[in-house]
């Protein structure tokens, strides 16, 4: 079973690359951001509540995010593996993911980090905001807030996997196709 954490700041290309690779490797794509946005579209109680954090560029609290991820994860008992996109984003989430996977007799295979500098990320996110309809991409202050939250709360998760020898960094700047090719080779080698 391949359980890949696709890591990197907002705008690094995690969603784009996951969508391009999941079918090829028969993996299930679990994006907590997508699940929150689906709840917002469907106007669920969870969606209304999560939106207040998302619109301000803050993380949705761990307990709810972890419970939601676990719930989605259990919907795919026959999966050959997963690409986790946008999760874990805190040390508590990383520990929870280890526990969820260990209980099922498996574990994280690798964390692959897409590395992109902040100014490139701001440019990409503003461009995405012009067409995506995402409130959190439309405003530069919110984008910078998300990057600050990433540096403070999410970047340390990299060390968590480095300590286990599971982190692989990849340059996330270049054509989408060239980055997909690099990711493909890396995933094949795992
Ligand atoms: P994303 O689509 O991954 O950029 O996520 C959009 C927003 O959803 C984030 O800025 C957070 O507000 C929220 N979110 C997504 N994933 C998580 C997570 N693992 N933990 C907490 N909040 C999250």
Image (spheres, rainbow, N blue to C red):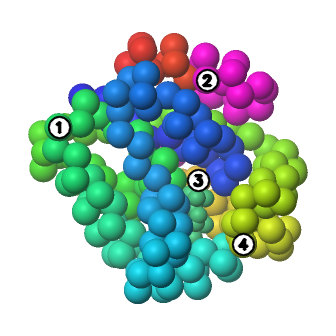
The quarter of the rendering in which ligand 1 is drawn is: bottom right
Question: In the displayed structure, would residue 76 be above or below residue 64?
Answer: above
Mark 3 and mark 4 lie on one chain; the one further toward the N terminus is 4
In the rendered image, the residue lying farthest to the front is 42
Q: Which residue is mark 1?
A: 78
Mark 3 and mark 1 lie on one chain; the one further toward the N terminus is 1
Q: Nearer the viewer, residue 122 or 28?
A: 28
- Rendering coords of residue 20 (x, y %): 55, 30
Q: Is residue 106 left or right of residue 29?
A: left
Q: Which residue is mark 3?
A: 155
Residue in the image at 38% along x and 61% along y: 93
**In this orientation, does residue 190 appear?**
yes
Question: In the displayed structure, would residue 174 be above or below residue 185?
Answer: below
- Does residue 164 show up magenta in the picture? yes
Q: CA distance from mark 3 to mark 4?
A: 23 Å
Say which of marks 3 and 2 sits in front. Answer: 2
Say which of marks 2 and 1 sits in front. Answer: 1
Q: Which residue is mark 2?
A: 180
Say which of marks 3 and 4 sits in front. Answer: 4
Tag 3, which secondary structure? Answer: loop
Residue in the image at 43% along x and 22% along y: 24
Mark 2 and mark 1 lie on one chain; the one further toward the N terminus is 1
Q: CA distance from mark 1 to mark 4?
A: 35 Å
Q: Which residue is mark 4?
A: 135
Q: Are marks 3 and 2 in contact (CB under 8 Å)?
A: no
Q: Nearer the viewer, residue 44 or 69?
A: 44
Could you classify mark 4 by the number of other residues whose Cα lies within 10 Å: few (under 14), some (14-19), or many (20 or more)?
Answer: some
Mark 3 and mark 2 lie on one chain; the one further toward the N terminus is 3
Q: Which residues are magenta?
A: 158-182
């Amino acid at each position: 079973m391949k359980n890949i954490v696709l890591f990197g700041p907002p705008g690094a290309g995690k969603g784009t690359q996951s969508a391009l690779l999941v079918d090829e490797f028969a993996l299930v794509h679990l994006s907590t951001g997508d699940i929150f946005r689906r709840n917002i579209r469907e106007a669920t109680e969870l969606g209304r509540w999560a939106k207040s954090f998302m619109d301000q560029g803050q993380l949705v609290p761990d307990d709810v995010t972890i419970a939601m991820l676990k719930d989605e994860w259990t919907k795919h008992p026959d999966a050959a593996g997963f690409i986790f996109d946008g999760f874990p984003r805190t040390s508590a989430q990383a520990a929870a993911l280890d526990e969820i996977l260990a209980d099922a007799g498996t574990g994280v295979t690798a964390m692959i980090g897409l590395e992109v500098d902040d100014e490139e990320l701001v440019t990409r996110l503003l461009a995405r905001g012009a067409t995506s309809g995402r409130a959190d991409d439309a405003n530069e202050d919110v984008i910078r807030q998300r990057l600050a939250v990433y540096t403070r709360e999410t970047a340390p998760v990299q060390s968590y996997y480095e300590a286990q020898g599971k982190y692989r960094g990849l340059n996330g700047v270049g054509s989408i196709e060239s980055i997909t090719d690099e990711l493909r080779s890396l995933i094949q080698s795992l």
